[in-house]
Image (tube, rainbow, N blue to C red):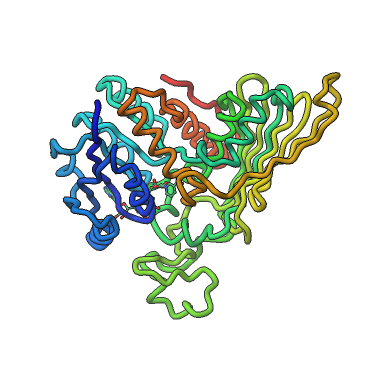
Amino acid sequence: MSGEIRLGVIGTGQRAGMVKLWQQNEKRVQIVAAADPNAPNLERFAQQLGSTVWTTQDWRNLLERPDVDAVAVLAPDFAHEEISVAALEAGKAVYCEKPMAITVAGCDHMLAVARNTGKLLYIGHNMRYMPLFQTMKEIVDSGVIGEIRTVWVRHFVSWGGYYYYHDWHALRRNSTSLLLQKGSHDIDMIHWITGHFGQKVSAFGQLTYYGGDKPNDLTCLACPEQRTCVEAKLEPGARCAFRQEVDVEDNMEMMIQLEGGILASYAECHFAPDYQRNYTFIGTEGRLENSEIDQTVHVWTRRSGTYRELTNRVYTVKSNYPGGTSHQGADVLIFQDFLDALLEGKEPSVSPVAARMAVAVGCAGAESMRHGGQVVEVPPLS
Ligand SMILES: NC(=O)c1ccc[n+]([C@@H]2O[C@H](COP(=O)([O-])OP(=O)(O)OC[C@H]3O[C@@H](n4cnc5c(N)ncnc54)[C@H](O)[C@@H]3O)[C@@H](O)[C@H]2O)c1
């Protein structure tokens, strides 16, 4: 494919805010169409773009348009598989948000259709373009901390209620587990930075803070406690975070055994006061740890019999991110990678196989924590 890509956007909610930034690539992409069953979201999106965008409330109509070369699937997780498969079969290239799908079978279905149609399937694991995490990968790849043996990741999710417990995210039937919705990012980082996929997991998790006995149809705007409730989200449609139907765990701990004899632990908590991802990689010759708050990576070296043992280091990530500030520039850079793959045949930075493996580990974790922490094998690629 060469020349300008005509893009259709499917799903125009919160995430679609980044599409305006994609217009920075105006020589290579033009946003021509958008679909969303939610008419106000669709209208707001079209207005934000400031250009003529054809709109529909049914994404199937969008896929019928011959003037759409590629689609961005920014719909909720449960819709990724159906929309992406239909788009690939309609001859469109696909940029689909993470998590790839909410089941391993769903991911495998997407992989098979991409293979059969020969169309590009790209999953939006944008953390691969965040400078802090790229810096950690570069340090590990340099060999300065030796062979990685242990990984500890702690994900403190503040605004955990605001983003995840007022809408579709809070139900297993829509997202399987927040180990996919949120955790697939971190699992992908663990896989990418170590260069190895998870093979077995054991996890514990519970609904500690959200959920409860409030009616399922109670919205924050209609709630008599809206002035005192610390989780009130005073936006149209936001439902009570303490409603009965909420069933995804908000507090999870997972052990992962990776290929190559590497052990990883992952903790995710959705009622933390602060937001940060804290990663430690321990290798045979040293350890690194990031601080997301001050955008630094610390490296400590141990005795290795090499010149490296003489120096500990601190890396500071600068804040003039190429691409702007949306996820530290990552949302623009990853889309450029998608266009490079589409227009120039470049090997994508995110393989759909890696995206599938992140979902597979998250699903295994969900199964484990719902069965008393039993060890669950991560299904290999079929
Ligand atoms: N990579 C990241 O950093 C990142 C950040 C936020 C969200 N996301 C992903 O983006 C996706 C969307 O998340 P969001 O926060 O925008 O959710 P959202 O609920 O704000 O928006 C989803 C939109 O999709 C629409 N929709 C629902 N069903 C649809 C369907 N079948 N077809 C088309 N549209 C449909 C909804 O009406 C809504 O407008 C999710 O998969 C999420 O995981 C990724």
In percent of the image, x 48 and y 66: which residue is there?
A: 213
In percent of the image, x 34 and y 37: which residue is there?
A: 95
Q: Relative to residue 254, is residue 165 depicted above or below? A: below
Relative to 342, is 281 on the left or the right? right
Q: Quadrant of the N terminus?
A: top left
In percent of the image, x 42 and y 72: which residue is there?
A: 234
Q: Relative to residue 210, is residue 268 depicted above or below? A: above
Relative to 12, is 123 on the left or the right? right
In percent of the image, x 74 and y 27: which residue is there?
A: 145
Q: Nearer the viewer, residue 85 or 5?
A: 5
Q: Residue 101 location, x and y as percent?
A: 38, 37
Q: Nearer the viewer, residue 32 or 167?
A: 32
Q: Quadrant of the C terminus?
A: top left
Q: Relative to residue 112, is residue 374 depicted above or below? A: below
Q: Residue 57 location, x and y as percent?
A: 19, 53
Q: Quadrant of residue 140?
A: top right
Count of marks, rendered view = 0
Relative to 78, is 324 on the left or the right? right
Q: Residue 71 location, x and y as percent?
A: 27, 39
Q: Quadrant of residue 316?
A: top right
